[in-house]
Amino acid sequence: MSQDPGSSRGAPLGTGRPLALLSCALAWLLPGAGHFFLGRRTRGMAFLGIVVTTYLIGLGLDGRAYLADREHPLTALATFANVGIGPLDVLQRRATYDRLVWQLPAGPAREPLLAAMRTRVRSQNSDYGTAFLLTAGLMNLLLILDAYDVAVGRKATLEEQPE
Amino acid sequence: MTSHFGLMAIFSLLVSAFFALLSRDVPRESWRVFWVMSASMILASLLVAFVMLPFPLG
């Protein structure tokens, strides 16, 4: 998170760890809410628009949510990226698997989930949609880290410049 | 929308807008980052597609 040296203005918030954690939690619950809470309202609204638009385009393109699979450890990272979007993650899991599931189980319960995933992947735009969904989750993870930086004063300004 | 180029352009614009807002505080600099980044992503994608043209699809 680089900060433009010429853009420092106003006093750093220096609000301490509890408020930083609260802003991180808000940022996870709703993209941009952490920045909104910390006084960067215009920026927070813009982040909300960008991340949610990316997410909705991903859903509209039949993107699929990943499931953590012990046989393929890297799927845990993709699942983490999906979960980064916050409670909205529920929508993509419902759309893909018609239930709330984050891990691919062993045994007979595995096959219906794989079948649901295959059905979703058959869609022409599914790969694009999946990329949009992953990107939306990763964007929100970056927003959480940025909200933390703002809250502890590493990147804080009280005022936003007029847009 | 099923156009590969259209989807790629939308993706580039969204990602560029995100990083422009995240990395710059001054609006003028944000706009500059947005245009440079989105143009770079789109042009780089077209260049890679052109380079891959001789390779078989299958």
Image (spheres, rainbow, N blue to C red):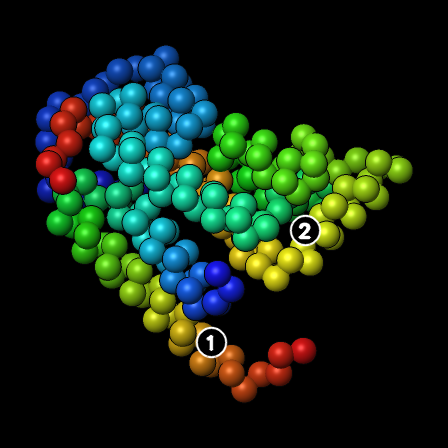
| Chain letter belonging to callout 2 | A
Question: The residue under label 2 is which amino acid type?
Answer: Arg
User: Camera-side residue: A35 or A117?
Assistant: A117
Q: For the residue marked with disc 1, what is the amino acid?
A: Ala
- One can see residue A70 in this view: no
Q: Between tags 1 and 2, which lies in front? A: 2
SS under mark 1: helix
Q: Quadrant of residue A79?
A: top right
Residue B47 vertical position relative to residue A16 in the rendered view, above or below:
below
Which residue lies under the disc numbered 1?
B49
Q: Residue at x 24, y 59 (%)?
A: B35
Residue assigned mark 2 = A120
Please state the horizontal and vertical placement of residue A18, each as a whole percent of the image: 37, 13
Q: Residue at x 40, y 32 (%)?
A: A31
Separation of residues labelled 1 and 2 (CA atoms): 26 Å
Marks 1 and 2: CB-CB under 8 Å?
no
Looking at the image, the residue that sits furthest to the top is A18
Q: Is residue B8 above or below residue A89?
A: below
Q: Is residue A42 left or right of residue A116?
A: left
* Horizontal side of residue B11 vs A40, given as left or right: right
Q: Position of residue A50 (x, y in %)?
A: 36, 43
The quadrant of the rendering that contains the N terminus of chain A is: top left
The part of the image, by quadrant, that contains residue A9 is top left
- Kindly tell me whether residue B55 is visible in this rendering: yes
Q: Is residue B49 above or below residue A62?
A: below
Check disc 2: other Cα within 10 Å, few if <14, some if 14-19, many if 20+. Answer: many
Few, some or many C-alpha atoms within 10 Å of disc 1 (few <14, some 14-19, many ≥20)? few
